Image (spheres, rainbow, N blue to C red):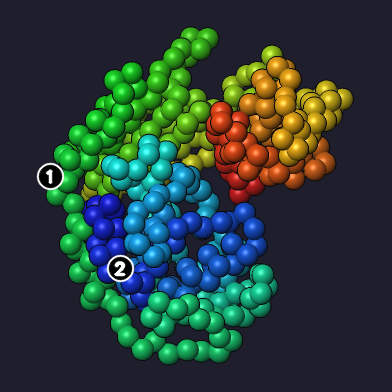
């Protein structure tokens, strides 16, 4: 297995971007421009590397080459973005790689683009790129054409050498286990399990019992052999189950209005471990959005809008509003799920305002709300 943390270090050692590797401080897939730029880079690397993997490392300062990190990104459906916009879409994989010196909620994003003999081209317009466009690399530049292009060099040997030097070993695996345990408080009960005598999985979480059922919050799950964070949540409640061949994660969201809250199953993820040292991950969306009285929803929606306007004008909030501002993203989320007009626009407007508050509770819940909506949208 490839140790992804070591792979990133080897890629960064090259410093300059090239025809098989790119680095970004962050990506944005919420707007057409951000999607278009991401699609361009992925497919330029794919088209220019038909015999070997190519990579994008996210969370890296382009000038200093320093690791800054990004938020955990759990979008298992990111391949759908490729499938939607390209003929012969490349196969890609997004992984969250923890680094010891980063804050607990930060990781480095690693996009692996698998080789394909077929040329990918746009099948529809997006941003300023037109249908039929082909992207390719010349050194560190991603270029575009409407005609065929020529591959001037093969990166197969150098990429294979980089990947070989990042191969896992016993020491790296043990270091990963100790690093995981040392990074988590004892109250989170960090532990590990070995599957099929080859794959080590670590997890931690704060356990609590609700109505006789055990839930874990602030859950962190890592596949140690590859140094990949499989799951991370600052808020959600999770059920964890496992046997000798699988590890199961059922994620719940805590939703409601005012004092009427309940747990709703969001997604079930099963990691199947195989005898050959490989594994696969299967996810199933379970979410059935709760429906509320429309009159009550409009009242809550208007109250949130009033708080939003006060935040925009930097006006003081009442005691009730100071409490409600923490739940504002959750209320907007419920309004979106119940098809209240403009609720999503108002949710997006709240992002920077909540981020700038001294108490980050509302901003954390904003990120959770957006994550839930992304999962529902893709599925």
Residue 190 spot, x, y in % from top left = 29, 26
Residue, disc 2: 15
Q: Nearer the viewer, mark 2 or mark 1?
A: 2
Instruction: Give the camera-side residue of 237 and 306.
Output: 306
Q: How many marks?
A: 2
Instruction: Give the camera-side residue of 49 and 313.
Output: 313
> How far apart, in angstroms, are the residues tagged by discs 2 and 1?
26 Å
Residue 96 spot, x, y in % from top left = 39, 48
Label 1, residues with CA under 10 Å away: few <14, some 14-19, many ≥20: few
Residue 283 spot, x, y in % from top left = 49, 42
Residue, disc 1: 171
**View extreme (top): residue:** 212
Q: Residue at x 47, y 89 (%)?
A: 149
**Which of the 4 image quarters holds residue 330?**
top right
Res 88 visible = no
Compare marks 2 and 1 and give the one earlier in the sequence.
2
Instruction: Give the camera-side residue of 108 and 124.
Output: 108
Q: Is residue 148 left or right of residue 21?
A: right
Q: Residue at x 53, y 51 (%)?
A: 77
Q: Secondary structure at mark 2?
A: loop
Q: Secondary structure at mark 1?
A: helix
Does 156 appear above or below 241?
A: below
**Which of the 4 image quarters holds residue 286?**
top right
Instruction: Give the camera-side residue of 163 and 70.
Output: 70
Q: Is residue 138 left or right of residue 148?
A: left
**Which of the 4 image quarters holds residue 91?**
bottom left
Q: Is residue 148 left or right of residue 169?
A: right
Res 314 visible = yes
Label 2, residues with CA under 10 Å away: few <14, some 14-19, many ≥20: some
């Amino acid at each position: 297995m490839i140790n992804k943390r070591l792979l990133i270090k080897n890629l960064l050692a090259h410093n300059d971007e090239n025809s098989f590797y790119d680095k970004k401080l962050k990506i944005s897939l919420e707007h057409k421009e951000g999607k278009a730029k991401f699609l361009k880079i992925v497919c330029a690397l794919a088209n220019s590397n038909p015999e070997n993997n190519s990579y994008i490392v996210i969370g890296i300062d382009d000038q200093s080459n320093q690791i800054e990190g990004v938020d955990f990104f759990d979008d298992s459906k990111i391949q759908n973005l490729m499938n939607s916009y390209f003929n012969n879409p490349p196969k890609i994989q997004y992984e969250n790689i923890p680094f010891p010196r980063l804050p607990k909620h930060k990781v480095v994003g690693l996009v692996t683009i698998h080789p394909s003999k077929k040329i990918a081209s746009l099948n529809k317009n997006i941003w300023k790129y037109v249908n039929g466009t082909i992207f390719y690399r010349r050194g560190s530049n991603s270029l575009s054409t409407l005609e065929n292009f020529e591959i001037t060099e093969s990166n197969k040997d150098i990429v294979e050498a980089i990947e070989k030097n990042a191969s896992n070993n016993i020491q790296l695996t043990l270091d990963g286990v100790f690093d995981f345990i040392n990074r988590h408080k004892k109250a989170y009960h960090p532990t590990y399990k070995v599957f099929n005598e080859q794959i080590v999985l670590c997890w931690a979480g704060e356990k609590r019992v609700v109505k006789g059922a055990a839930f874990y919050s602030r859950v962190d799950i890592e596949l140690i052999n590859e140094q990949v964070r499989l799951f991370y949540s600052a808020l959600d409640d999770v059920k964890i189950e496992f046997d000798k061949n699988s590890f199961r994660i059922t994620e719940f969201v805590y939703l409601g209005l005012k004092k009427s809250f309940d747990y709703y199953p969001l997604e079930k993820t099963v990691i199947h471990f195989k005898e050959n040292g490989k594994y696969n991950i299967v996810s199933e969306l379970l979410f059935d959005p709760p429906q509320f009285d429309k009159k009550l929803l409009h009242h809550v929606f208007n109250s949130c809008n009033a708080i939003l306007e006060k935040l925009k004008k930097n006006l003081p909030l009442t005691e009730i509003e100071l409490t409600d501002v923490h739940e504002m993203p959750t209320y907007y989320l419920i309004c979106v799920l119940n098809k209240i007009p403009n609720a999503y626009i108002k949710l997006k407007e709240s992002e920077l305002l909540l981020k700038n508050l001294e108490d980050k509770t509302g901003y954390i819940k904003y990120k959770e709300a957006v994550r839930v909506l992304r999962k529902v949208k893709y599925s």
